[in-house]
Image (cartoon, rainbow, N blue to C red):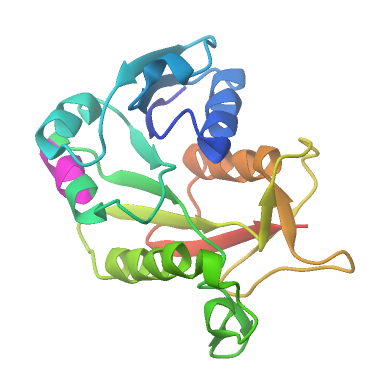
Amino acid sequence: MAKVALIGASGNAGSRILKELSDRGHQVTAIARNPEKIAQLPGVTAVKGDAQDGAALAELLRGHDAVVSATRFTGTDFSIIADALGKAGVARYLVVGGAASLEVAPGQRLLDQPNFPDAYKEEATNGAATLDYLRGLDDLEWTFLSPSAMFVPGERTGSFRLGKDQLLSNENGSSISFEDYAIAMVDEIEAPKHIRRRFTVGY
């Protein structure tokens, strides 16, 4: 059993990761700006917190084995979170990543394709920049888990593939449910295989 802090525990990905952690018997400090939106689950303590309030965040993170962030990239300064992790003495940090920085061909990111939707470009660009930032850190055991292109509500099937820096796809396109993504994230918490690396999950 691990003691995990989850930032953004009420969101689409965060709420599924929270349930997966709870179902597997972990102790979770679930952090959100509106803690009343956090699901009441066994082993879960909901607390109010802001990822951009570094001093307060450090106090919330202290004593945990790992921290997961499931926040939007736009409007989040990840250096504040990294600094809070350092002050809290927590080395293990896992990030709900984006798909846009994955390669669709050697050296060609999904983000840079001509048909990439403008509506998602700012968030995707900030996600890619966050991955670059993490790659420059050598004092943090970070992991960045990128979903597939379609990251949507669905079923917990437990049947998926893992990859590295290339976008995963099949005859139905590139997709992963929030529920199966959560399995891959919690698997990584329980048995780390991607320290200071990005990996991806898809069908």
Instruction: Indicate left or right for 183 with 25 as reference.
Output: right
Image x and y of residue 26, in percent = 49, 21
Residue in the image at 55% along x and 29% along y: 15
Residue in the image at 50% along x and 73% along y: 101
Residue in the image at 10% along x and 34% along y: 55
Image x and y of residue 157, in percent = 81, 39
Query: From what the image shows, is residue 145 above or below residue 128?
Result: above
**Is residue 86 magenta-colored?**
yes
Question: Viewer-proximal residue, 53 or 143?
Answer: 53
Q: How many marks?
A: 0
Question: Viewer-proximal residue, 60 or 8?
Answer: 8
Query: From what the image shows, is residue 143 above or below residue 186?
Result: below
Image x and y of residue 47, in percent = 32, 17
Query: From what the image shows, is residue 83 above or below residue 182?
Result: below
Residue in the image at 53% along x and 9% along y: 42
Instruction: Indicate left or right for 146 with 138 as reference.
Output: right
